Amino acid sequence: MKSVKVYSTPTCPYCTMAKDFLKEHNISFEEVDVSENQKAAEEMVKKSGQTGVPVIEIDGEIVLGFDEDRLRNLLNIK
């Protein structure tokens, strides 16, 4: 199973779409609320170079935003 981490905020619609997509496909993920966790926000920026959310990390690969095609590819979802 792949390691999936979603950096998000509670008010971000694209974050909700990404998390719903992962749940729909039974993909387990760790959710990190960067609006509440400054250290995690800094970690996200260091990994992605971005301050916007969602940032999704899949086995070390970074996906910026809700990029469904890239998520399908990295997670082997048909």
Image (cartoon, rainbow, N blue to C red):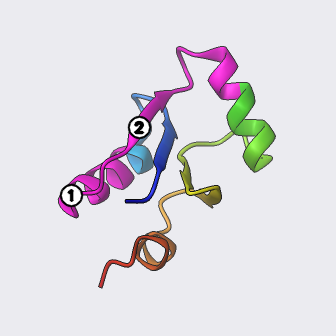
54 and 47: which one is in front? 47
* Residue wearing tag 1: 26
Query: Is residue 76 left or right of 42 when viewed as pictured?
Result: left
Which label number is shown at residue 43? none
**Residue 58's x, y, as percent?**
53, 57
* Residue wearing tag 2: 30
Disc 2 crowd, CA 10 A, few/some/many (<14, 14-19, 20+)? few
**Residue 15's x, y, as percent?**
42, 45
- Residue 22 covered by magenta stretch: yes
Query: Which residue corresponds to the image point at 48% horizontal and 43% vertical from the top-left?
Result: 6
Query: Which residue corresponds to the image point at 19% horizontal and 59% vertical from the top-left?
Result: 24
Query: Is residue 2 left or right of 16 when viewed as pictured?
Result: right
Is 37 situated above or below 57? Answer: above
Where, by quadrant of the figure, is residue 37 drawn? top right
Query: Which residue corresponds to the image point at 22% horizontal and 64% vertical from the top-left?
Result: 25
Mark 1 is on which residue type?
Answer: Asn
Q: Quadrant of the C terminus?
A: bottom left
Is 27 situated above or below 13? Answer: below
Q: Secondary structure at mark 2?
A: strand
Mark 2 is on which residue type?
Answer: Glu
Give the extent of the magenta segment: 16-41
